[in-house]
Image (spheres, rainbow, N blue to C red):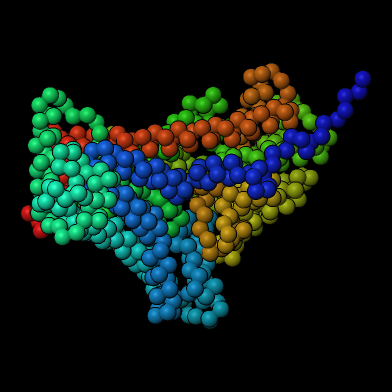
Amino acid sequence: MKVPPLNHADYLIKTAGKYQALGRKFVTSLDKSGAILPVVLLEATVTGGRTYQAYQRDGFVEARERVTEESLGAVFWLFGAKMFGNLFDKLGRKFLNIPKKMPDVGRDAVRTPFDNFIAHAADKLKLTPDKAEQIKKNLARYSVGKTAASIITACLFIGYVVPKLNQGITKHLFGRMNSADPNHEKAPDPLKNKITLKDARAILTAKDVSINAVENFKARKTLSSDMQKQNTSIPSFKAGADSLLRIVQNFEENDVWKLMGTDVGTVTGRTANARNKDERIEIMFRDISSIYFYCFSMPAIVKFMNNHDEFGGKNTKLNPMSAAQVHNYLVEEMHKKGVSEMSTELFSKFALGSGNVNEDFMTEAFGKAQKPINKKYLFGLIKKEQKPPMRIVSLERFKELVDVYYKNSSESEILKLTAEKMSELQPKKGGTSILTEIQVQDVFKGGVLRQPDFLKSVFNNILKDKNDASPITNKYKYISAEKLEDLRSQVYNYAESIITDAERNKTKVTWESMKKMNKRNMYRNGMFMALAMGVSSLFLSTIIPKIQYYITYLRTGKNSFPGTENLNQNK
């Protein structure tokens, strides 16, 4: 009986449509380096958790401060630097004749968008070299000043405006409490350990009240609390705490750096505006200890899980959307060859190539290979391997060397044509097409995954935004060459994980086994991110507040909110 041929469409991963790709897109957006979405989701859970903890410790008053500070602070922390940056751009265009679209200021061996912008302006406006250099300096100063000003302005709002506003609301609410008349039907119950939401409604609707009422209420509350403490040696861990959302990566390319830039101002401002020493210590502990879990714990946990995965991260480091694109491309290319399965050896040659890299050619083009350097930090306690600087060669020089080393070879024209397409993965530098060392190696090795057109599609799909569908060829946009090389290696490692899986099972690489590995990539990525966010959220919303409040208890003997302790003395 003849087995009907497989329909390759059944083995493709759906990435189009509103619902099919929703999960993949969501996990991919969480996994992007420097993405702000994980921090937004984390902050939402932390705000709820810390507000609950605050209510458990000291009732409505502290809970109200927490939710107000978290909500308003989060708006300026997450979006303040960008919002003020856009405002300064508008002012700059109006009063300083700043161009409507400024280039990115990042640069490396491959991309120099700022220089490209100045060169284009100089050519268009017929500027002298001195005039072009002066404009370059002025725009550079403006870019640095705008970034600094936007971060400082956001810091002022988070560290000074929001705390003062929050304290003013609390003082106003306390002023509406009337315990001078204990028979007042809307007065808070003085025997309660905290002001509840029911009490809060009474406070907000009471009339003719005195600010001194709060001290009487707090005093009676303390008496009742002290009587209960005689029967307990340590307080229960009913804590609550503030949030400090500060972390990020490069101010221009990475939203996390913008957030990190506001941290210093936030901690400084909140500390300076604390109402007493006890509150000041709480603020310093919660904000400083939160930084790691807002910024660094999630990528660290994901990295740990990848490194301890059975494939060493080769299957899971590639984001789910790119993994689906790689999978579909491999299935389509195998279908074109009329096969649905391959031996591991044939699949390796098919996907990753089998060409030899001519070492003499590479030395002639780039010089002798450079070894990584171990850089020491903290008096040598920490050692980190520093990659050698990225090296490039012009496309013209590459072709000259091909004519020398492959003069009578049939490969000559193929190498030149592939190199031309490979050079289009980045803008020209100074009007010259260039190739990186890794790109030249890919030209020699071959394989469907190393084809320039495919790599270009993968890079653009993961890096594009609503304003730029082809970012890698945008000469005014900066994309780190190291970032692209990392994504490139993740693509190749993903293919290697497919080969490793088949070798372990002693089977061929089939469309079915490839689809299984792709699903594994999706599920493991989602699981790693969920675990990372869960651990970070646990520390930020629960563990840090509990430790924070316990420190206050050890120092003062009280398990109450220190922010309103001396409100009467400050009136």
Location of residue 235 in the rendering, given as x and y in whole percent from the top left corner: 18, 29
Q: Is residue 492 left or right of residue 551?
A: right
Drawn side of residue 202 relative to residue 182, left or right: right
Q: Quick one: 192 or 130, which is closer to the camera?
A: 192
Q: Which residue is at a point 36% across and 43% down the rendered structure image?
A: 48
Position of residue 287 measured from the top left corner of the image (x, y, whole percent): 27, 45
Between 549 and 498, the one lying in front of the other is 549
- Image quadrant holding the C terminus, namely bottom left
Residue 450 higher or lower than 419, as above or below: above
Quadrant placement of the N terminus: top right
Could one spot residue 524 in this view of the protein?
yes
- Which residue is more in the foreground, 167 or 390? 167
Q: Is residue 128 above or below residue 417?
A: below
Examine the image and state in which quarter residue 542 appears.
Answer: top left
- Is 356 displayed left or right of 150 in the figure? right
x then y, percent, for residue 3: 88, 24
Q: Nearer the viewer, residue 304 or 194?
A: 194
Residue at 57% x, 38% y: name it. 318
Q: Is residue 508 above or below residue 405?
A: above
Q: Residue at x 53, y 46 (%)?
A: 29
Q: Position of residue 196 (x, y in %)?
A: 25, 43
Q: Please indicate, yes or no, whether residue 166 appears anywhere in the rendered image.
A: no
**Residue ranking furthest to the left:** 569
Residue lying farthest to the right in this orientation: 1
User: Residue, x 32% and y 54% (percent of image)?
Assistant: 73
